[in-house]
Image: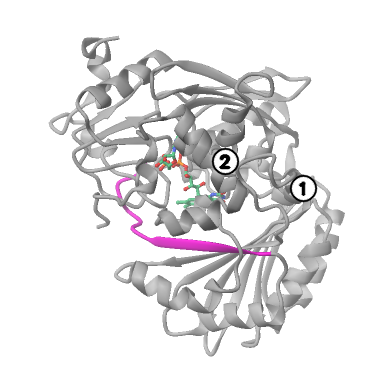
Amino acid sequence: MTTSELQDKIVLPRDSRYRQLRSTYTTVGSPAAVLLPENPAQVAAALRYARERNLPLSVRSGGHGLSGRATNDDGVVIDLSGMNRVDVIDRKARIVRVEAGARWAQVAQALTPYGLAISSGDHGNVGVGGLATGGGVGWLVRQYGLTIDHIRAAEVVLADGRVVRADADNEPDLLWAVRGAGSGVGVVVAFEIEALELRDVGIAQLAVGLDREGRALRRWADYMASAPRELSTAVTLVPHGRSAVASITAVVAGASERRLRAAVEPLLAIGTGVLDEHAQIAPYAALVSTAHLHPNVGQQPVTTTNGLLTAMTDDDAAAIMSVVTGPGQPLIQMRSLGGAVNDVPADATAYAHRHHGVLVIGTMFPPRGGARLDAVWEPLSGRVDGAYIGFESRPDESAFKRIYPDATGDRVREVWSRYDPDGIFQSLWQPSQAKRR
Ligand SMILES: Cc1cc2nc3c(=O)[nH]c(=O)nc-3n(C[C@H](O)[C@H](O)[C@H](O)COP(=O)(O)OP(=O)(O)OC[C@H]3O[C@@H](n4cnc5c(N)ncnc54)[C@H](O)[C@@H]3O)c2cc1C
């Protein structure tokens, strides 16, 4: 395919579409061109376009990546938003083919009539491609595991333009890398994912007062370590007076009010008091809603990092509370892990963290940035063990070692260099030139 065949798929700065396509959620970019392929052959042509001009390359699915490296300055962005089909290809086996440019809200909506769901993340505007090549810590994570744990096949356009299918029998190393380290192997254009039979979920929103010492956090973590798998929770810690309040979203996979009440009951007793409590049964798609859909124009220039805890000790909980109530004012969120995530052997995918119970995420809002986040995160940096690519704004060598530790990191590097010998997909790991407003 030649440039002329990409003709109306090349958006240059003078094009009226450029303003909506130049940026990501966190970062305003000024790419030389945004290419909008609609099939694998056009993705291959787009890769050739970038390579022939020797331009930096960004691959974008939903543009929600926290690094903002799905845009750049003066390079080429391959934007997959035109490849967004969602097809149930085998209802009995629950296999769904999802193109990388779909948003998870669109996936949830398309699966609702089939009574199926795929656990993705907490936001409907996040793209399939970035999340499904990194992990996928979703609302059903303890019941279902990570999104990548259910990927059965991936269609990938490699650096040399070849289109390959990776599954258990063909290119198994490629499939291994796609599931957790997919940003470095090529452009993943579609995934076949085994969905879950699920219509409705129980959702509880709680606000719970916290003690400064962290006893409530410890009780949350202890409960989640033994709670029924159908329960997953996300806890946002909001400074309040001299302490903090936990805003907890608890999701039970299944539509039983009785089970929701039973699962949530112990959470009401973790803190110094319950400030608010709502519970409802709703379709899964209400959690990853189409109401979340919006263009990404660099509107949220945050800096985020994260770390994993096997279990939470008293000292861990106290350290988290000191960060939350300290002067730095980061937003701290915790996600329950464990359950089905830890059923998967550590070497089965490129996401190796299979013994942890808690993911802790720290976010700094402007005008404060990375240096400030590092300073306030310091009490936690020696306590956490490993990290998740999805919530890291600054993928660099030190982040690589936390995200892909030891033998996993060696294998990731080996597979990346085998499938992408010239390293054209390494842009995620190189410092971004594009600006945060
Ligand atoms: C508001 C918000 C909420 C979030 N919530 C969750 C959550 O609940 N759970 C969770 O697990 N994560 C969550 N995330 C993190 C999210 O999963 C990652 O940021 C993910 O990378 C976003 O995917 P995207 O396609 O939108 O990103 P993009 O910005 O399009 O891509 C990010 C990077 O992924 C790579 N990439 C993208 N598409 C492809 C592809 N098709 N092939 C190969 N590489 C590709 C590229 O290196 C790119 O730079 C959240 C992020 C935000 C901003």
Residue holding disc 1: 340
Q: Of residues 418 and 129, which is closer to you in this image?
A: 418
How crowded is the residue under tag 2: few (<14 C-alpha within 10 Å), some, or many (20+)?
some
Q: Can you tell which quarter of the image residue 117 is in?
A: top right
Q: Of residues 421 and 311, which is closer to you in this image?
A: 421
The structure residue drawn at horizontal position 39% and vertical position 13%, both measured from the top left corner, is 41
Q: Position of residue 96 (x, y in %)?
A: 65, 24
Q: Specify whether residue 254 is painted magenta.
A: no
Q: Is residue 342 left or right of residue 334?
A: right
Q: Quadrant of the N terminus?
A: top left
Tell which residue pokes out farthest to the left in this image.
14
Report if residue 98 is visible in the image: yes
Task: Identify the amino acid type marked 1.
Answer: Ala
Q: Position of residue 65 (x, y in %)?
A: 42, 47
Q: Sequence order check: which comes first, mark 1 or mark 2?
A: 1
Q: Can you tell which quarter of the image residue 300 is in?
A: bottom left
- Please give the range of residues in magenta: 295-309
Residue holding disc 2: 411
The structure residue drawn at horizontal position 75% and vertical position 37%, both measured from the top left corner, is 198
